[in-house]
Amino acid sequence: MASLLVSAQIYIVDIGKIAFDTDSDSLRDFILSIELGSRHVIAGSLANITNGGGTSVLAVNLQRWSSVLSRQYFFGKNTLNYALREISPYTSGIWIDWGTNGIGISSAYSSFTYKLSDRETEVDQTYFENITTILTVESSYHTQGGNTKVNVTVSLLNEDKPALANQILIYYRAAGNWRIAEAASNYEMTDYGNGTYTASFDADIPSPTIEVSGRVIDQRQILVQANVTSVQI
């Protein structure tokens, strides 16, 4: 968590300059740096949580981020308050839904109020940050000559925009056990460069029902997963 906060600080301009340079452009840049830092902390926290960390990580990191900011400015009052979203489906700012309907969601949401005041400057800025990674998985299969060919399409979104994956793992269930598709015969993965990926492989699956799972880590290291039942064509 310490390295995450250090990374967030790269977005902070030299706060000491604000006491002497309070033109509107400098102030806008300054506020933007605070917002970008907050966004970075939320994304890093969500990555931590989805990869096995506790949900309390978000609140802990935001509290430390707020504390870091409060110690950076020595010419007046400088505070950042946050409120984790508690409206369903969010709990403590986190919404993780890795469903069996082909859709997986990993999301974190917090609102912020930033206040700065000294003899020359008054800032009262409210904003929110919502980091959301969405995965959709679709699958079909056909059987020919005793072989089952499974096709899987994976689509990734960051804040409703196409996003690139850092890692994609496809699994399928056979004889009650999950197996990695990459180890199956004739496995192929195609990257279309727009957040859409397709995989195909041959598998010996005795059951007429084929379950497929996609496990994806995006470029922000946020993990998302979704399962779906393959459709026969």
Image (cartoon, helix red, strand yellow):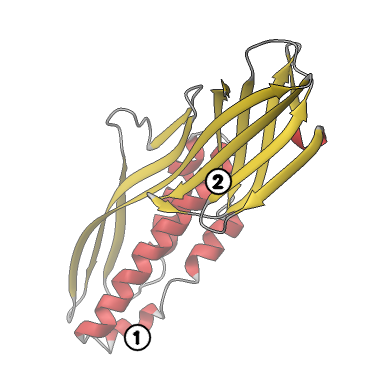
Q: In this image, 113 relative to 202: left or right?
A: left
Q: Classify mark 2: helix, strand or loop.
A: loop
Q: Quadrant of residue 184?
A: top right
Position in image of residue 174 (x %, y %):
74, 16
Give me the residue at 35% from left, 85% from top. Answer: 17
Answer above or below: position of 136 versus 66.
above
Judging by the rendered image, the residue that carries numbered circle 1 is 17
On the question of residue 37 being in view, the answer is yes
Tag in front: 1 or 2: 2
Position in image of residue 129 (x %, y %):
34, 52
Answer above or below: position of 135 versus 211.
below
Task: Determine crowd level at label 2: few under 14, some 14-19, many 20+ residues with C-alpha closer than 10 A.
Answer: many
Give me the residue at 49% from left, 28% from top. Answer: 102
Instruction: Residue at the far front: name it.
Output: 145
Judging by the rendered image, the residue that carries numbered circle 2 is 222
Q: In this image, 122 relative to 101: left or right?
A: left
Q: Amino acid at mark 2?
A: Ile
Nearest the camera: 65 or 189?
189
